Image (cartoon, rainbow, N blue to C red):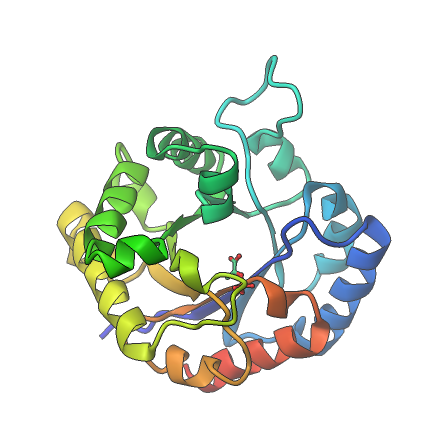
Amino acid sequence: MILRKKLIAGNWKMNKTGAEALALVQEIATAIGKQPDVEVVICPPFTALASVAPVLDGTLLKLGAQNMHPEAGGAFTGEISAPMLRSFFATHVILGHSERRAYFGETDTFINQKVLSALKNQLRPILCVGETLAERESGSTLKVVQTQTEKGLEGVSKEQAASLIVAYEPVWAIGTGKVATTEQAQEVHAFIRDLLTKLFGEAIAQKVRILYGGSMKPANAPELLAQKDIDGGLIGGAALEARSFIELVKAAAAAK
Ligand code: PEP
């Protein structure tokens, strides 16, 4: 049996100025900067990458971004490319978050271009997939997740797939306080693992971390993280406060 190291990633969304980000990351780094049992990724807004990067240097914490453009450069006003993220020592990038899909019209095809560009530039994509409440209620959860996963990963080679991270984030659970039950989450995570097996083979699918995201908090994390196919969490609200984020990392360490 392959043991996957648990991963906790904080998605700060459009929160924290450079100075606020620095204060938060210093508190987190002091508490868990040398935690070897859990991989921890901090994803501040673009504007805080520069202030946060030096604090993470010398710790085990990694830096991620929340989005990027697939092109390396050019006339794309307001956008940021993979090489630019790399220049801030970012190692991870969240792609296809449901807020990007819903508010910025991102399609599976566009997200796929970003995934390919991230991999080409040695950034590990955290590909987000998940159904809306209407889709769950109409019984199409697995179909939606299958389409988003397969289209999002089109053209990814087996070699590249080993560095992928997938996040299952039911849209109805994001920022709502409504968490998926452990059974609901594990069912979809196992389904994603099966899809990855079909796409890339058993050995690689067993290595890919599949995170749960959607109102994960210290109180509900232990039960979720104990599930066979839940390899960590993508954390929104609870990542904005050092105490709750640190508690989540501890929960992941205890669940390993
Ligand atoms: C997210 O936006 O990725 C997320 C999981 O948010 P929250 O934890 O606030 O539900």
Residue 106 coordinates in the image, percent (x, y):
44, 33
Would residue 60 be visible to someone looking at this image? no
Residue 92 placed where, x, y %? Answer: 53, 48
Residue ranking furthest to the top: 75
How far across and down, in percent of the image, does residue 101 sit?
44, 40
The image quadrant where one finds the C terminus is bottom left
Give above or below for 21 relative to 38.
Answer: above
Number of numbered tags placed on the structure image: 0
Q: Which residue corresponds to the image point at 68% horizontal and 65% vertical from the top-left?
A: 240
Nearer to me, 184 or 204: 184
Name the residue located 50 percent from the left edge and 76 percent from the top edge: 37
**Quadrant into which the N terminus falls:** bottom left
Residue 53 position, x and y percent, is 73, 51
Report the front residue among 67 and 125: 67
Which residue is depicted at the point 58% across and 29% down?
A: 81
Which image quadrant is residue 65 in?
top right
Question: In the rendered view, does 190 fall on the left or right side of 32?
Answer: left
Query: Which of the 4 quarters of the picture holds residue 10?
Result: bottom right
Is residue 133 rendered to the left or right of residue 206?
Answer: right
Residue 117's place in the image compared with 204, above or below, is above
